[in-house]
Image (spheres, rainbow, N blue to C red):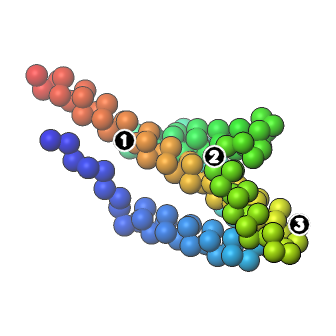
């Protein structure tokens, strides 16, 4: 019987902290908040690259999935000329329009979208990391089952 994936308390604490900081920055968009969140996301992507190259095999799969999906989301959203076309972007734009249609400033709207973009990049990376980690565990179990037969 396959055991379900369980979060460690450290992972849960990190996800909840990042989500809380992201929501706090989204509540009152500012240039400092957008810049800070961008630095955190780029640091996570860079750290993920380092750990993926030089880390333990248990962490390597998660960080490979994290950087692949994080950079992939960033590339599609920003560099490939498709801003606003991904499902997350459509939700962000809808929320931004609801929030700022009542007389909000355009600069604040841009900051809101930028902060949400960084938050979605990190969330997409995290989900990709979990999927990669799960696939690695499943492959390892299948390999051990074949060896034990």
Q: Is residue 57 above or below residue 33?
A: above
> Going by the image, does 29 lie left or right of 64?
right
**If you read the primary sequence from the N terminus, does the residue marked by circle 1 or circle 3 appear first?**
3
Q: In this orientation, does residue 115 appear?
A: no
Residue tagged by mark 1? 134
Residue nearest the viewer, comparing 2 with 9: 2
Q: Kindly indicate the quadrant of the structure image that contains residue 43.
A: bottom right
Q: Secondary structure at mark 2?
A: helix
**If you read the primary sequence from the N terminus, does the residue marked by circle 3 or circle 2 appear first?**
2
Task: Report, in whole angstroms, how far the alpha carbon at label 3 lies from the one at label 2.
Answer: 22 Å
Q: In this orientation, does residue 88 appear?
A: yes
Residue drawn 64% across the image and 38% down it: 72
Q: Position of residue 65 (x, y in %)?
A: 51, 40
Q: Is residue 8 above or below residue 139?
A: below
Residue tagged by mark 3? 106
Task: Report, in whole angstroms, how far the alpha carbon at label 1 lies from the one at label 3.
Answer: 42 Å
The answer to whether the residues at label 1 and label 3 have Cβ atoms under 8 Å apart is no
Task: Report, in whole angstroms, how far the alpha carbon at label 1 lies from the one at label 2.
Answer: 24 Å
Q: Position of residue 117 (x, y in %)?
A: 70, 55
Count the numbered circles shown: 3
Q: Position of residue 2 (x, y in %)?
A: 20, 42
Q: Secondary structure at mark 3?
A: helix
Residue nearest the viewer, comparing 38 with 101: 101
Q: Secondary structure at mark 1?
A: helix
**If you read the primary sequence from the N terminus, does the residue marked by circle 1 or circle 2 appear first?**
2
Q: Position of residue 84 (x, y in %)?
A: 75, 46
Numbered badge on residue 87: 2
Q: Kindly indicate the quadrant of the structure image that contains residue 95.
A: bottom right
Query: Which numbered disc, 1 or 3, marks the residue closer to the eye?
Result: 3
Quick one: quadrant of the C terminus? top left
């Amino acid at each position: 019987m396959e055991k379900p994936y369980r979060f460690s308390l450290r992972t849960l604490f990190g996800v909840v902290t990042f989500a809380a900081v992201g929501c706090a920055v989204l509540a009152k968009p500012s240039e400092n908040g957008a810049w800070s969140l961008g630095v955190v996301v780029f640091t996570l992507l860079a750290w993920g690259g380092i750990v993926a190259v030089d880390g333990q095999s248990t962490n390597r799969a998660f960080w490979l999935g994290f950087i692949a999906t994080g950079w992939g989301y960033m590339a599609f959203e920003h560099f490939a000329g498709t801003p606003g076309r991904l499902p997350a972007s459509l939700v962000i734009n809808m929320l931004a329009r609801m929030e700022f249609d009542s007389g909000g400033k355009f600069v604040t709207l841009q900051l809101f979208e930028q902060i949400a973009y960084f938050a979605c990049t990190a969330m997409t990376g995290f989900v990709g990391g979990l999927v990669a980690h799960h696939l690695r565990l499943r492959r390892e179990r299948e390999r051990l089952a074949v060896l034990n037969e």
